[in-house]
Amino acid sequence: MKKWLLALAGILMTVSLAACSKTVATTSGGKITESAYYDSMKKTSSGKQILQQMILDKVLEKQYGSKVTTKQVNAQYNTYASQYGSSFSSVLSQNSLTKSSFKKQLRSNLLLREAVKDHTTITQKQLKTQWKSYQPKTTVAHILVSKKATAEEIIQKLQAGESFTKLAKKYSTDTATKSSGGKLTAFDNTDTSLASAFKKAAFALKQGEYTTTPVKTSYGYHVIKSIKRPAKGKMSSHTSELKKQIIDSDMNNSTLLQKVIGKVLKKGNVSIKDNDLKDILSSYLSSSSSSSSSN
């Protein structure tokens, strides 16, 4: 009798839970409840990734939320909006993002950056290494053409005194910049959008100079003119910028990020209540443990 009552209680509990579970969708073949949806989602890799991110966001917000302002998030958002211009909305849509969800992602990234800064000790040796590749933001204009001979012809015209701006408008195949005389957004040594050959040639120019040989990239041949070229100066004057570049580099180091996330999660006292998901953070927590034991 006791076993029977216990079994009945279990059945009643299951029925009660199912009844309380909100219906997500109805079909001619039956309804889909929140509990059924959750049970299905937690078994997928995407579902687990979402939970990992939700947990990480919670602990990061607790530990570093006061260090990231809405102003910082909006500034990053506006930078992207300016970069993509009129196509920004469609770019967000193509990536299944809204203005709100994208800002949430930006905030998560800024919080993680604060965690990386908190767990990084930058040495003088690292600063000196970064200084070797450091270049202050420079502004250039370029004329892009498909043939080397055309680029050489443009250089001859420049040497004869013709206007770089007029030649860019006439010859350049870069439709995004030709109307403005080929002018590009200022960039420094950390820029990843420009070819290394292009950056090397641009950094070698003094303000007002232009390349006297065509610069070849995968896009074609460039003639580059330096518009604004600040002096590099002394390392001591750029310490904060060098540190920023080192942290930015760390943010692209997946091994380092995993260790930092592990430390953040460990400090966050995360407790997984669903037995099916109890190991969801194991890869991060194990990397944190091995990192701690090796120090």
Image (cartoon, rainbow, N blue to C red):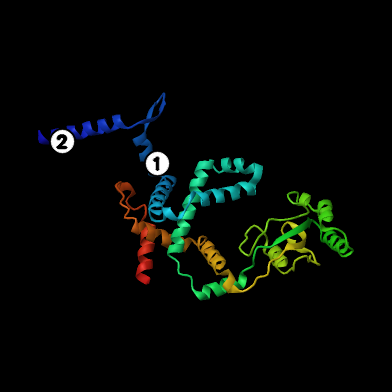
- Reply above or below: 218 against 26: below
Q: CA distance from mark 2 to mark 1?
A: 30 Å
Which sits in the foreground, 24 or 3?
A: 24
- Where residue 153 appears, x then y in whole percent? 87, 61
**In the image, is 100 to the left or to the right of 234?**
left
Horizontal relation, residue 237 to residue 278: left or right: right
Q: Give the crowd class for mark 1: few <14, some 14-19, many >=20 residues within 10 Å.
A: some
**In the figure, 9 relative to 291: above or below?**
above
Residue located beneath label 1 in the image: 41
Q: Which residue is mark 2?
A: 6
In this view, which residue lies farthest toward the top?
A: 28
- Amino acid marked by disc 2: Leu
The residue at 60%/50% (across/down) is 79
Looking at the picture, tell me which residue is in the foreground, 68 or 13.
68
Residue 27 image point, x, y percent:
42, 26
- How many numbered discs, if any? 2
Identify the residue at horizontal 37%, vertical 56% (top origin): 265
Front in this rendered view, residue 116 or 234: 234
SS assignment at label 1: helix
Residue 73 in view in this figure: yes
- The picture places residue 241, in percent across and down from the top left corner, at 56, 65
SS at mark 2 in the image: helix
- Between 118 and 173, which is closer to the camera in this rendering? 118
Q: Earlier in the sequence, mark 2 or mark 1?
A: 2
Residue 288 position, x and y percent, is 37, 63
- The image quadrant of residue 181 is bottom right
- The extreme left residue here reads 1
Q: Amino acid at mark 1?
A: Met
Side of 239 where 112 appears, left or right: left
Say which quadrant the C terminus sits in: bottom left
**From the image, which quarter does the N terminus lie in?**
top left
Relative to residue 171, is residue 72 drawn left or right?
A: left
